[in-house]
Image (tube, rainbow, N blue to C red):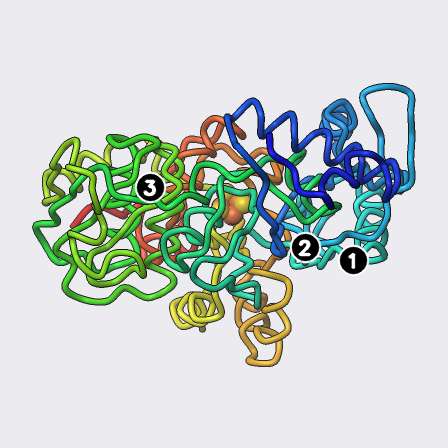
Amino acid sequence: MKLTDDEKALLDGQEGLARQKAMELLVKYGEALGAERLVDTNNVCGGLVSAQPYKREFASKMGSIDAVFSEFHLDSQEVVEIPPVKAFTCRLIETMDPVHWKMQGVEPSTYEIVMRNELFCSRIGIHLMNTCAPYLVGNVPVKGEHCAWQESSAVIYCNSVLGARTNAEGAESTGAAMLVGKIPYWGYHLDENRLGTHLVNVEFDVESVMDWGLLGYYVGEIVQEQVPVINGIRRVPNISRLKHCGAAAASSGGVEMYHITGITPEARSLDEAFGSNKPLETLKFGKAERKIAYDNVTSGKDPNVDFVVLGCPHYSIEQVWHACRLLEGKRVHSNISLWIFMPRALKEVADRQGYTEIITNAGATLMTDTCPALGHVHPKGAKVAATDSAKQAHYLPATLGLETWFGSVEDCIQAAVTGQWRGELK
Ligand code: F3S
């Protein structure tokens, strides 16, 4: 790999052992990927820092940050101090809510570690956004900006909606990128890899958040890790719709970038979206395909729901407002836990607006920082879940063994209030 003088200096250890090890990791990683060089990044989102012992061990084996001990553990007995980060860095989700951790079944010892992690991260300059939707709380890279983001729903939003550039990084590469402000220049950093590969003709007006989730889920299952170009959308979707669509496509496939002609920034036309590529396949998304996606994402069989999850990806304030309007004056069924997740930075707005009070008075809980599917938090004994997120519905059966209904937020609130799933594809 071709390195600049400043990169060689980092690799030689002129800025200390931690940065040297970070460079070693990035160079090895880049060479394995066939990258010819590194690119500067000043926007790193990583979710590495964890209180879970198995993750700590993994992180230390891979030579990444173990904030628990405020040190940099290598794949040997060697231990070094972690210096302040070089790139603007924000932390993705955590393993627990800092207030409702007991309700989530988190042990006091884990709580202690997480809070020590948090303190350590803030001291070295990692911004504690603690959300999978950093673009909702101020981390909004501009078109063309090179980033190093982890978390699939954030990555696909960054590439597709913002037109910034990132691959789906891992805990180790983001940990290293934080320290040196570099990342291998390959994949979605390159113009040619951002061009469309599959054409998707949409045959009906996709409007609801639920339908946007189903569109993403259907397309992701077919194109897997390629770049779909969605054509025929007549009404501009908002943030909620786009984040649900992307999260779904990244779950059923491994989509890291999509285009919507006339809407997303690198697809002003079909010609621009495909560039020199010819579509490998032309798909359609009509009512029949929507039904296929719905059947594939829904694993619920027992209508007696005991757990309702909203806020995957983390809800915007608009979505919390919408949930409150559905919930106000109602009471969550005594057998049900309704957990709604949002970024911690927006929770204060929810408090100020009275949304937290509405949610609490209804017997639900507004949570931050984590989610059931990735944080592995859930009410004790829960067996049947319901959610408005195709991503959460995709992962809950595998990660927590919960059969899961998928539907609209209205279906989910109704299930939370009655204890029964009555949602269906209309
Ligand atoms: Fe975020 Fe968890 Fe969903 S990390 S995208 S809320 S699975």
The alpha-carbon separation of the residues under discs 2 and 3 comes to 27 Å
Q: Percent from the top left, x then y, of residue 113?
A: 84, 42
Would residue 358 be visible to someone looking at this image?
yes
Q: Mark 1 points at which residue?
A: 125
Label 3: which secondary element: helix
Q: Percent from the top left, x then y, of residue 196?
A: 25, 43
Q: Given the image, on which type of amino acid does mark 2 rest? A: Thr
Say which residue appears at 65% left-offset and 59% top-offset.
Answer: 129
> Any mark on residue 89, and which?
2
Note whether 146 is above or below 196 in the view shown. Answer: below
Residue 358 or residue 137, whichever sits in front = 137
Say which residue appears at 51% left-offset and 64% top-offset.
Answer: 140
Note whether 351 is above or below 383 in the view shown. Answer: below
The nearer-to-camera label among 2 and 3 is 3
- Quadrant where the N terminus lies? top right
Label 1–label 2 contact, CB within 8 A: yes
> Any mark on residue 192, and which?
3
- Decide if residue 197 is on the left or right side of residue 391: left
